[in-house]
Image (cartoon, rainbow, N blue to C red):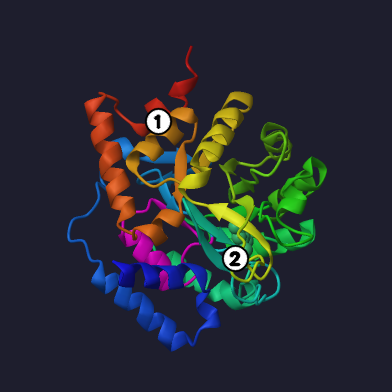
Amino acid sequence: MSFQFKFNYLLLHQPLFRFDEALSFEIQIDIYRKNPDGETCPLNDNALKTCLAGLEFRNPTMLASGILGYSTESLKRIAEAGAGGVVTKSIGVKPRMGYPNPTVVQANCGIINAMGLPNPGIAEYASEISFTKIITKVPLIVSVYGFSAKEYAEVAKTATEEGADAVELNVSCPHVKQTGSEIGQNPKLLAQVVRKVKAATRKPVIVKLSPNVTDIVEIAQAAITARADALTAVNTVRAIAIDTETTLPILSNTRGGLSGPAIKPIALRAVYDIYEGTKTPIIGCGGITNWQDAVEFLLAGASAMQIGTAIAQQNPEVFQIINRGLSAYLKKKKFRSVKEIVGQAHRS
Ligand code: RRO
């Protein structure tokens, strides 16, 4: 179990391109060989089928951005493990090394990270997008960031031309200056970015929102007015951890973003508020660990959900477990589809 966790932890928190490539490939294969699950999740259960922003998903679960990086092999394995869709780690115009270690620290009910947007840059990653699209049989969403609206649009254009089914705009990374939440906390800037991206691609544009704002509905509305096709709620919550021995902050960047079960009620509230205030489809994200969490997000108003930290804390099998639980819940409650329960918590 601890062996398992260590390797999952490695995969999650060290972008693969920082390693010797051959070594990182071996690590991935090894992990998945140790976690085969003969049974398949209810992939053909029509009740789980989810349509969102013009995309069709065999079930409402997706890999969240930032988990397991970019490689075709990782994304394919997550699809094989039962995810209905996959989202890559965020890609920008230029390659970035990210922050030095330590970039991750375990908190009581979650993980605090400050990776600093490490990525190979869109020119380097472009061919992997087309390859992943051929190999991975579920919708492929490329997460995009930029330091200007023009950069977001440039990356989104290339990603969708290479075969991405949609882009998710990262306007919510909590700890990199001049991008992420510095854009997503400002409705005007956010609208400029979304408009420019919409003009650059005909594929669906999803906007990933920050929980680190006073009024998330105001921000959601700015994205919708600029014609966002769907919203993901939410990215990580700003956080810090301090080492009692050194008496100093643990992360090299001092502050990071908290994910995992600790933020689930915050994310759920964000989904509930956005559903009440808008009509745009919502993808819930934040601390979803089991099928009961997934049901709560659907009832709050999410049409689909992304799973991240739970993959590191359990393993990719979590997708099958959640989908089986969802399926059984729908049957027990006599609902014909997940669609029927979206937003049910709002009925009066
Ligand atoms: O790379 C990161 O440090 C990071 C990103 Br891009 C993000 O969107 N959210 C986060 O918690 N970390």
- Disc 2 crowd, CA 10 A, few/some/many (<14, 14-19, 20+): few
Q: Secondary structure at mark 1?
A: helix
Three-letter amino acid code at disc 2?
Asp
Q: Position of residue 146 (x, y in %)?
A: 73, 62
* Disc 1 target residue: 339
Q: Ligand 1 lies in which image quarter?
A: bottom right
The percent coordinates of residue 66 (x first, y second) are 53, 62
Tell me where residue 217 sits by quadrant. top right
| In this picture, residue 319 sits left or right of residue 149 | left
Q: Provide the residue span drawn in magenta.
A: 66-87
**Cβ at disc 1 under 8 Å from ligand 1:** no
Q: Earlier in the sequence, mark 2 or mark 1?
A: 2
Q: Looking at this rendering, what residue extends furthest in the front direction?
A: 245
Q: Amino acid at mark 1?
A: Lys
Which mark is on residue 243? 2
Name the front one of labels 2 and 1: 2
Point out residue 273 in the picture as x, y percentages from the top left corner. Answer: 60, 29
Q: Is residue 242 magenta?
A: no
Considering the numbered disc 2 on the image, is that residue within a helix, a strand or a loop? loop
> As rendered, which of 144 and 344 lies closer to the eye?
344
- Quick check: 75 left or right of 54? left
Q: Residue at x 30, y 35 (%)?
A: 47
Residue displayed at 39% across by 68% down: 8
Where residue 15 sits: x, y (%)?
A: 53, 74
| Residue 292 seen from this side | yes
Q: Is residue 178 above or below residue 199?
A: below
